[in-house]
Each structure stands twice: as structure tokens, then as C-alpha cells.
Amino acid sequence: MNKKVLLTGISGYIGLHCAKILLEKGYTVVGTVRSTKKEEEVIKTLNSNSVSIENLSFTHLDLSSDKGWDSALSNCNYVMHVASPFTVENPKNESDMLGPAVDGTLRVLKAAKKNGVKRVVLTSSTVAIMGGKKTGTITPDDWTDLNSKNISTYFKSKTLAEKSAWDFINNQSGDNSLELVSINPGGVFGPPLGKNLTGASMSMIVKILGGKTPMVPNTSFPMVDVRDVAYLHVAALTEPKAANQRFIATEKIGRSFQSICQLLIDNGYKGPSTKLAPNFMLKLLSIFDREAKGMLAMLDMNLSADNSKTMEVFNWKPIPFEKTLLETAVAVTKITSH
């Protein structure tokens, strides 16, 4: 079974879960990292989760540079492109986020094609699908309207990166045509494999549990467990029916931050608040606060998702969100209390 996968962003929240499943399934994994320190962190995390790392190696690659991609991709059958800048807040300069997201994705695809890789699985997001919509059900055929009001830089970066990936795939020439599968997760929760809680969804849970979020925004959209996201990424490498398709990775129904906080309160957590932040307050804050500005596109959003294609093609049933949230809270509490 010894197929070789280049996994970008291996040290991240989703990347570590992908690495765990790949190694357990017998794949040879080359993880891209930016530093030796990250390498050590990944090894330590996988070891502490009883994952054998005998088929794991690392390569130091940067999404903003061409250096090293050819040698890293030699003899790779697949690429899993998970790495992408993610923050809720809008950066001072849009180009700081848009450039790496779009150029990095194209750099990965070009190098994969050049080196005879069979398929790339791309981590996109439902923010590439739902921007500009307020109500209704999102489907894999939908795209974020980049001209709609208050679209955050992160929404733009994910939409432009995925669009440029599909343009590349649809316009490629030559015999060895590269296949692409895009996995579009909603809000990602679930216990982290390591102790790093700096990612967007983990730091949000840390704040909510610690009582540092006195009010929550009025928004509701579909969520997903990180373990499901990783399962779908790995299944997408080899599933014939998945070739050149995009898949929504979420539950069907949307979850509001209010309901998330209520669920935590019902289970004995004292920190969460179910108080809704008035929209005008977030709009006012957004003048000074980049994180508030990043949330504006999601105000009054009440969306559900059509995940039937994902469930069918991958024979997948989402982990119930209640289980996801409570296991996340337990893991986060354990990490933060040490």
C-alpha cells in the first residue's frame, strides 16, 4: 500500500489529524514545515498519540518560494495541500493574506503536475461557498460573491485560492492530467492532537470557556469535527468518484454561537455567555478592531448545508456536533489547566 503523500501544513490543527490517519493507514508521508522546531513538535505530538513515525519525513518548504518543491515531490503519488493562512481578523494589507493563499496554491499545483503527481486534495472552506448569502442551504455548486458587502479578507483568500486552483485544473495541457479534489469544511472543532491552541477555532473556545467572550455574534452556519475533516481528506486521495469534485464537509444544520455556548453551560461550564452582541456594536467596533471587521460578513447569517454528495461518495456520517463540542471542551480545559 506504500503510497507517498506530500502533506503541506502538517504541524497545523487539521494537518496533524491528517498525518495521524495517513500514517496509520500505511502511507509514506513527507510533511512540509518551516522550521526544525515544528518538526520536533509534530514528532512529539504523534508519539504522544501512539502513532508510528517510521514512514514520516520532513521537508522545509515555503509557499511563497519555488525552492525545494521539485525534490520534495519526487516519487510522490499524492499531495494534500492543507497549509493556508487563517485568521478571523482582516490583515492591514489584503495582499498579505491573498498573495500566499493564491500563489501558494498555484505553486503546489504546478509542482505537482510537473512531477507527475496523480491527485491533489485541497483544503478549501465553506467560506469559499457561503459569502454573500444570509439564509438558505449552501451546495457544492455555490461560490462566495466577492462583490457582496463586508466580505472579509479570509473569505476572499479562500475563494480566490480555490477558484485559481480549478482554473489551473480546467486549463491544463499535456498527457498526465492532474486531478483535484477540494474539501470545504465549515467551522472546524474537535479535540486537538497536540497542545497548540493558537488556531482560530481553538483560541475561540479557549476565550469562551475562560469567560473572555462576554457577547457572541448573531450568526449560524454548519460545523464539522476535525477528525471527520481528516478522514475525508485521506479518503479523497484514492476515491475514484471524487476526482475533480468539491465536497462540503459539514453537518446539514447550522449552529449559532449562542447555541454552542448554551450547550457548554448545560454541561456545567461556567465561562460561556449566551448574550448576543448587537449588530450595531460590532459595526462600530469594526472601525477600530480588525477581528470585528472580519465578522461583519457573517452577521445575521443563518445557513444550512447540503452534504448529501459527501456522505454518499465517501460513505460518511458526520460525528454529532454535541460530541465534538464537549470533547473539544474537555481537551482544551485539560491543556489550559496544566
Image (cartoon, rainbow, N blue to C red):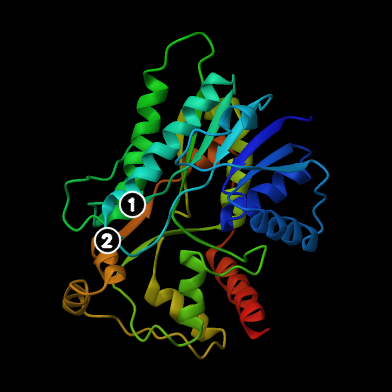
Packing grade of label 1 (10 A; few <14, some 14-19, many >=20) is some
Q: Residue furthest top?
A: 175
Instruction: Let me know if residue 172 appears in the view.
Output: yes
Query: Quick one: quadrant of the N terminus?
Result: top right
In this picture, residue 195 sits left or right of residue 96: right
Pinpoint residue 317: horizontal percent, then vertical percent.
58, 50
Amino acid type at circle 1 is Asp
- Rounded to the nearest angstrom, the CA distance separating label 2 from label 1 is 8 Å
Q: Which residue is mark 2?
A: 92
Q: Quadrant of residue 286?
A: bottom left
Residue at (42%, 56%) from the top-left corner?
A: 86
Which residue occupies the foreground of this view, 138 or 70? 70
Which residue occupies the foreground of this view, 176 or 307? 176
Above or below, 144 relative to 263: above
Pinpoint residue 104: horizontal percent, then vertical percent.
44, 39
Query: Quick one: quadrant of the C terminus?
Result: bottom right
Amino acid type at circle 2 is Lys
Q: Which dot marks residue 96?
A: 1
Which residue occupies the foreground of this view, 132 or 76? 76
Above or below, 72 relative to 82: above
Q: Quadrant of residue 159?
A: top left
Above or below, 27 relative to 279: above
Instruction: Let me know if residue 238 appears in the view.
Output: no
How many numbered badges does the structure rendering display? 2
Q: Are marks 2 and 1 in contact (CB under 8 Å)?
A: yes
Pinpoint residue 215: horizontal percent, then vertical percent.
33, 83
Q: Secondary structure at mark 2?
A: loop
Residue at (57%, 54%) from the top-left corner?
A: 14
Q: Secondary structure at mark 1?
A: helix
Packing grade of label 2 (10 A; few <14, some 14-19, many >=20) is few
Residue at (82%, 58%) from the top-left corner?
A: 50
Pinpoint residue 265: horizontal percent, then vertical percent.
50, 85
